[in-house]
Each structure stands twice: as C-alpha cells, then as structure tokens.
Amino acid sequence: MRGIPGRLLNRALEVHRPQTSDDGHGGQTTVLTLVGSVRAKVDQPSPTERMVAAQSGSRHSHDVYLLPTADVRRGDELRGSDALGNPQVFRVQSVVQPSTPVYSKALVELTQGEGEPDG
C-alpha cells in the first residue's frame, strides 16, 4: 500500500486515550478520555502477521490504516461501528510507519464484551 487515497479511509473512529489523575486519597485513577477522531481503514492482518503476533504473544486481530499525521498511540482505544452498525472497540498494541511515512498502521486487538457477537 503506497499511499492511502482518502476514499479508502472509509471509517470514522474516535480516539480515546488513558488519562491519569490523583484520586484525592493518595492514589491515582485512570480513565479513557476522548481526544479526537480519525479516518481509517480497518483490515484483517495477513496470515504471516497473525503467525508472528501469535509467536510473540500479541493479540493482534486487525490492522487499522491511518494518515501518517494521525495522533494514535499505543494504549489508545479506537471506537466506531462496523458496516452493519455494530459497535467496535479496538485496543492499540502498536503503531508503525513505513520508511517513507505515507501512512501509519496501528496493530490492534478487537475487544469484545460478554454476549457480543464476533466482529
């Protein structure tokens, strides 16, 4: 994938980032805060990528392609809906770019609540 034409970024995803603050009792609390939204293309990883992820203990279930300037980081959650309107939440495992930054690729895990259908 050389560059990503805008028409291929066919999904809008909200970016939620962990924010830590003092809880007032000597500890801290972490909440996910909406920090923006991005245009994205969500794909299944290749069989080779799945094998490498499994060997390294990663839970990489999807590739999310983004513009190279998208502010998406490891630990973020990307939230949106699939083509049928079902809600999806992806936990970002890592973000990589090719040597010429024409796109970013987030390796993510689709999280699933109990009783939800497979995504």
Image (cartoon, helix red, strand yellow):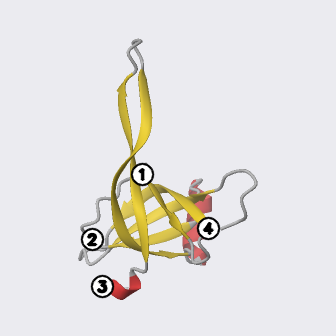
Tell me what residue is drawn at x 40 percent, y 51 percent: 16
Distance of label 3 from label 4 (alpha carbons): 28 Å
Mark 1 or mark 2: which comes first in sequence? 2
* Residue 21 located left or right of residue 53: left
Q: Nearer the viewer, residue 66 or 47?
A: 66
- Determine whether the residue tagged by mark 4 lies in a helix, strand or loop: loop
Residue 7 percent across, percent down from the top left: 36, 87
Q: Which residue is mark 3?
A: 3
Mark linked to residue 86: 4
- Determine whether the residue tagged by mark 1 lies in a helix, strand or loop: loop
Snapshot quadrant of residue 11: bottom left
Residue 61 percent across, percent down from the top left: 58, 65
Please say whether residue 46 is visible from this viewpoint. Answer: yes
* Residue 55 located left or right of residue 80: right
Distance of label 2 from label 4 (alpha carbons): 27 Å
Tell me what residue is drawn at x 56 percent, y 55 percent: 58
| Pointers 2 and 4 in contact (C-beta within 8 Å) | no
Q: Which residue is mark 2?
A: 68
Snapshot quadrant of residue 117: bottom right
Q: Which residue is mark 1?
A: 76
Tell me what residue is drawn at x 48 percent, y 59 percent: 79
- Determine whether the residue tagged by mark 2 lies in a helix, strand or loop: loop
* Three-letter code, disc 1: Asp
Q: Residues within 10 Å of mark 2 (few under 14, many from 20)?
A: some
Mark 4 or mark 1: which comes first in sequence? 1
- Determine whether the residue tagged by mark 3 lies in a helix, strand or loop: loop
* Three-letter code, disc 2: Pro
Q: Is residue 6 above or below residue 16?
A: below
